[in-house]
Image: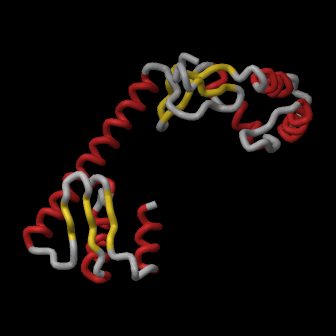
Amino acid sequence: GFSEMITFVKKHKDIKHIIFDFFDRMTRNDYDKIRIKRLIKEDGVTVHIVRSGKVYSEDFSSDDEFMYDMEVAVAKKVSNDISRKSKIGVREKAEQGFYPSIATIGYRNNKVKRLIDIDEERAPLIRDVFELMAGGEHSLQAIAEEVFRRGLRSRSGKCVNKSGIAVILSNPFYYGDFIWNGTLYHGKH
């Protein structure tokens, strides 16, 4: 939404004030910092930060500009720290055997327990995929058509095509493991 807001303000020259709750909601990187500065200096926009009571306008003093740059640096550091901690948390979740993303077809995310459960409707159809392949009499296309006829649909409601069937057959999730960021983990699902 940030880029859309900048475009909207540039297009509507009658907008002279932008209000942000916190400074870090305004900008977290140098590129956005420059875009906001241009709005202030070139377009005469005044930026208000509600929580701190700070106001940045085209009559920036050198002290104001220095503080602005410092606040951008702090917001960027906070954002980077959150990102790093989030990645560590997701990796730890994977190391504990919990898949940290959207469940693959045949399973579903349990939002209450924050675990992966078997999808009682689709799981038998996924089992059919493996059984049809194990029988040795069906091509990937034939399997796709057969399980579609039986009711297997993608999340978007479409037919799982032959490349999707190949993905299912080669996905370690179905034998209890999963790959996260290129590493194979043993799952608890």
Residue depicted at 86% across the width and 26% down the height = 132
Q: Is residue 19 left or right of residue 71?
A: right
Q: Nearer the viewer, residue 88 or 8?
A: 8
Q: Is residue 61 left or right of residue 165?
A: left
Q: Position of residue 171 (x, y in %)?
A: 65, 31
Relative vertical location of residue 11 with respect to residue 168 in this rendering, above or below: below
Residue depicted at 87% across the width and 27% down the height = 136
Q: Nearer the viewer, residue 145 or 109?
A: 109
Residue lying at the far top of the rendered structure: 188
Q: Position of residue 25 (x, y in %)?
A: 33, 54
The total number of labels drawn is 0
Residue depicted at 25% across the width and 46% down the height = 78
Colour convention of the picture = secondary structure
Q: Position of residue 105 (x, y in %)?
A: 70, 31
Q: Is residue 47 left or right of residue 65?
A: right
Residue lying at the far left of the rendered structure: 63
Quadrant of res 155? top right
Quadrant of res 92? top left
Quadrant of res 91? top left
Q: Position of residue 10 (x, y in %)?
A: 41, 78
Residue depicted at 37% across the width and 30% down the height = 89
Picture quarter with the C terminus: top right
Relative vertical location of residue 129 with respect to residue 62 in this rendering, above or below: above
